[in-house]
Image (cartoon, rainbow, N blue to C red):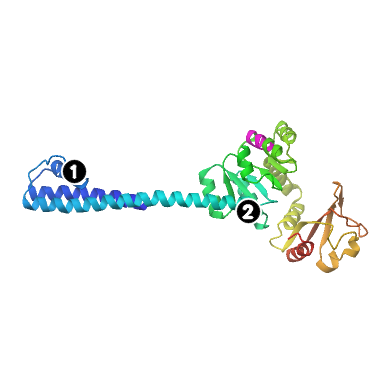
Amino acid sequence: MKKLILSIIFSMVLLLFGAMGYMFLEGASFDDGLYMTLITVTTVGYDEAIPLSAGGRYFTMVLILLGVGFVMFIFKEMTEAVVTGGLQKALGKRKMSKKLEKVTGHYIVCGFGRIGQVICQLLAKHNRKFVVVERDDAALEQIQKLGYLCVPGDASEDDTLLEAGVERAKGLIAVVSSDADNLYLTLSARSLNRNLYIIARSSREARVKSKLKRAGADKVISPYDIGATRMANLILKPAVVEFIDLAVAGNELGLSMEEIRVTSSSALLNKSLMDSGLRETYNLIVVSIKRADGQSIFNPLPNVVIMEGDVLIVLGERDQVYALEKTMGSA
């Protein structure tokens, strides 16, 4: 853009310079001088509007050299912009495609609006693999600057989801602009991957939530309901909300609440909470245990046995949680 503006300014200066030169050397009017300058610079070669003296001819030769040089410069800049821009775009797309082919066990975030941006920030913060699907050019430019993997296009199209690796993905988050788009997107994603964990955003309308559920969404979230509930709880039970914020975010006290999945190779397998060493070694509190069959045990007793497939919800210092995750192979 800067080069374009400079080119326009230089063109105006060159035309003005030529017109003034012919006015001074040949006594031409401004219109005749401008006409002579234009046909000289562009090397068109129409009939001369005024007879030229020896000084006028030398001045015309200077204008020709300036005009040809300027035109060649403009042509070079345009060619360079087209070729370089197109080449960079093609190479960037090819590089992105190679990265997308390798990613697996990731999450697909459909929509990079206000909610989608926050989701991506949190996923990146917790080192989770994810791909963003977005069709808005301005949003795509922002995504690329942030270094996120992205696929340009309509998220409800099967080809777009396949390019984002939906068949290899662990989950999908549908937060595009409208309920109708989220519904159609959920249908497409579920048909492509039956095991995909799908979270969809919806409005407050009950019928929309039920339709999203029938379409294949595992969880349907209404930001309006969540926001209203939180605001009410800040009035009704502020201490509880403060504790939950500290437990989930934990930025001030260095606390973290995380999920720890127990696998067949885990050192905690078939041990009771008392014998697991979670409290003594890591100083962690087990808030809840979610069994593989979906049963949840809140505030489990010390004699509860840890089983394969359990998900432990633990609370403690962030460094200790990460140390446990590394031991368990979850980090």
Q: Nearer the viewer, residue 271 or 157?
A: 157
- Residue 249's x, y, as percent? 70, 57
Q: Which residue is mark 1?
A: 39
Task: Farthest residue to the top: give it.
Answer: 207
Q: Amino acid at mark 1?
A: Ile
Q: Secondary structure at mark 1?
A: helix
Residue 185 counted in the magenta span: yes
Q: Does residue 202 appear anywhere in the picture?
A: no
Mark 2 or mark 1, which is nearer the start of the sequence? 1
Q: Secondary structure at mark 2?
A: helix
Q: Nearer the viewer, residue 231 or 69?
A: 69
Q: Does residue 278 appear anywhere in the picture?
A: yes
* Label 1: few (<14), some (14–19) or many (≥20) C-alpha neighbours in 10 Å: some
Q: Is residue 55 left or right of residue 272?
A: left
Magenta span of residues:
180-186
Q: Which residue is mark 2?
A: 121
244 versus 39 height, above or below: below
- Residue 40's x, y, as percent? 18, 46
Task: Farthest residue to the right: give it.
Answer: 303
Which of discs 1 and 2 lies nearer the camera? The answer is 1
Give the residue at x 33% y 52%: 76
Give the residue at x 19% y 48%: 16
Quadrant where the C terminus sits is bottom right
- Residue 166's x, y, as percent? 67, 44
* Label 2: few (<14), some (14–19) or many (≥20) C-alpha neighbours in 10 Å: few
